[in-house]
Image: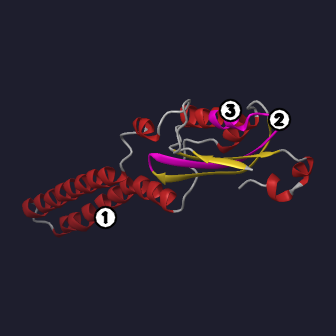
């Protein structure tokens, strides 16, 4: 069996430093969370000011409910705006499949590469919001240059799917692999 980590550039593959430009610049979760926090503070402060003005300039007792109503409404707004950041963060912590990666399409594209007879142990996960990783085993025809297959698969994964960390293990295809329950199940 042969394998190569994507961080080991060859003469035909770019160095890992070039891949940093593929990252989505608007996906920094810390900045998003800070902006949402500041906006939430502004909204809640505005709500407190509005409630205070209503209570101050109306003498009726029923208008004193403006404060808890504003607090409740603006708290719901802040919770709703925080949901996306929380969801994205949980996906990274749990090493979930990135939302912009179609697992079935990725698998079928790997299966259509020249000399690839079978794809198994395909794992895709988020390292951060803008860095994704993939690990896969490719079972190949006999008598093929594995280095060419590795370089082609690595280039496809970098260019089409923007993976920053790629681990590909190539192995010779054995007919019994097609009946192996572990090989057939999705990772």
Q: Which residues are magenta?
A: 129-151
Mark 2 and mark 3: span between their CA atoms?
Answer: 12 Å
- Say whether residue 150 is magenta: yes
Whether residue 107 appears in magenta in the rendering, the answer is no
Image mark for residue 72 = 1
Choose the circle earlier in sequence order: 2 or 3: 2
Residues tagged 2 and 3 counted as in contact (Cβ below 8 A): no
Quickly name the residue at label 2.
Answer: 143
Q: Is residue 153 left or right of residue 176?
A: left
Residue 17, position in %: x, y?
A: 41, 39
- Identify which residue is drawn at 60% across, 37% down: 154
Circle number at residue 148 = 3
Residue at the left extreme?
57
Above or below: residue 14 compared with residue 78: above
* Mark positioned earlier in the residue sequence (2 or 1): 1
Disc 2 crowd rating (10 Å Cα; few below 14, some 14-19, many 20+) is few
- The mark that comes first in sequence, 3 or 1, is 1
The quadrant in which residue 18 appears is top left
């Amino acid at each position: 069996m042969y394998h190569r980590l994507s961080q080991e550039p060859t003469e035909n593959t770019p160095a890992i430093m070039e891949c940093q430009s593929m990252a989505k610049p608007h996906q920094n979760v810390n900045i998003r969370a800070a902006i949402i926090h500041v906006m939430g503070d502004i909204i809640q402060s505005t709500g407190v000011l509005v409630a205070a003005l209503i209570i101050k300039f109306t003498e009726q007792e029923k208008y004193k409910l403006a404060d808890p109503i504003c607090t409740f409404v603006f708290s719901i707004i802040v919770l709703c705006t925080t949901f996306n950041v929380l969801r994205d963060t949980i996906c990274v912590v749990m090493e979930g499949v990135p939302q912009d990666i179609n697992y079935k399409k990725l698998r079928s594209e790997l299966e259509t590469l020249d000399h690839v007879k079978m794809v198994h142990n395909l794992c895709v996960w988020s390292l951060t919001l803008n860095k994704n990783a993939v690990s896969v085993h490719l079972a190949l025809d006999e008598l093929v240059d594995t280095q060419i297959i590795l370089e082609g698969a690595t280039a496809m994964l970098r260019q089409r799917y923007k993976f920053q960390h790629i681990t590909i293990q190539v192995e010779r295809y054995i007919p019994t692999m097609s009946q192996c329950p572990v090989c057939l199940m999705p990772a």
